[in-house]
Amino acid sequence: MTQFRRVFVIVLDSVGIGQALDAQKYDDEGADTLGHIGSGYQGHFELKNLQKLGLSNIRPENPITNVPIAPSPLASFGKMQEISVGKDSMDGHFEMMGLPVTEPLGFFPDGFDDALIKKIEDYSGRKVIVNKPYSGTEVIEKYGEHQLETGDLIVYTSGDSVLQIAANTAVMPLEELHDLCRYVRSITIDAPYRIGRVIARPYVGTNKDNFERTSDRHDYALLPEKPTDLDRLKEAGYEVIAVGKTEDIFSGQGITEGFHTTSNRDGMDKVIELSDREFRGFLFANLVDFDAMYGHRRNIQGYGDALMDFDRRLGELLPLLKEDDLLMITADHGNDPGFKGTDHTREFVPLLAYSPSLIGSQDLGTRQTFSDLGQTILDNFEVKGTEHGTSFLNQLK
């Protein structure tokens, strides 16, 4: 018999909680997203609801600045170590759902080869410019006016396995951009590219002073090579609801209903709205602004503001949860705004598990893989999983 009728998982995209055991492999020693935000934020920083759940209890030896250890946390707490070979959103989400990424994806620190660029130019009828790693906002600021004048395509990458195409919608209509990205996705699935995500990055504006990326971003991810825990739940007859970019990450596989959102606030609006719906199954939400708006831009203040805004919305959600609901809060990787560079950081991710029916809390320790999350959800719904992950359902009391 299932313990919880509904399971909600909210992924705070990029909210890491300190360098992972293998951070050295990724040149990420010293990364600490939450730690550096807490210590570097200028002004009053507090996360009342996350504090009450037990955020700083995860690492009592080094609590988050201005987030005290809770004497009696409301949630069970721990952290998770990633075993996938990358630190991209796709890697993290796939691993959470029982499919660790074991084959390295393609990375392009010097840009993409001439053969791929020519295919993009031939298909689109446009010249490609940039073709190297770049911050998404900086590349638009530097080359956006050139694009308006010429119609050239801004193609760039990052420290992750991504090919991104930025286009001003006044030059390239949204459907044309999406069509091009679908084509690029189709030719970069296998070696020698094997790119994790092709991302459409539309923006608007007339000059570098007012260029702004829109919420019509779309991620074209690699299809999961094997069934995920989403597929298992769906096949067992449970609802699997995706909020935010979750549906894009899994290319719709294993999802019964998806809701795209325009911001963290919109995402929480949808989660709160859906908490009033009677369903039996799993709601999987991703809040991407932490990563896209503040982590990559190394904006401690903006990141801190976004965390406090989420914390306030969390305060709205918690009273709406029912006795047979389980809420878990985690992340997919780090993106330390107080660290070097502009790329994701290899970190542990927080794990908080709360239900109104749980009395007291448990220290869930350090989970050896993100797959423990999915295995716990499957265990709750009595659905058979794989060899990846260990359920902690019986520790939730």
Image (tube, rainbow, N blue to C red):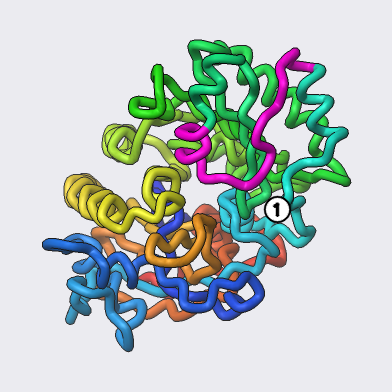
Instruction: Tell me if residue 31 is in the magenta stretch.
Output: no
Nearest the camera: 127 or 280?
127
Residue 287 shows in this picture: yes
Residue at screen point 39% across, 49% down: 8
Q: Quick check: 264 left or right of 250?
A: left
Secondary structure under tag 1 reads loop
The answer to which image quadrant residue 194 occupies is top right
Nearest the camera: 57 or 337?
337
- Name which residue type carries label 1: Pro
Residue 117 higher or lower than 97, as above or below: above
Residue at screen point 66% across, 75% down: 25
Q: Which residue is mark 1?
A: 109
Picture coordinates of residue 212, whole percent (x, y): 39, 28
Q: Quick check: 308 left or right of 388?
A: left
Picture coordinates of residue 370, whole percent (x, y): 56, 64
The image quadrant where one finds the C terminus is bottom left
Q: Which residues are magenta?
A: 123-142
Picture coordinates of residue 308, whole percent (x, y): 21, 54
Picture coordinates of residue 89, whole percent (x, y): 56, 51
Residue 124 higher or lower than 265, as above or below: above
Q: Quick check: 29 left or right of 113?
A: left
The answer to which image quadrant residue 96 occupies is bottom right
Nearest the camera: 340 or 270?
340
Nearest the camera: 196 or 123?
123
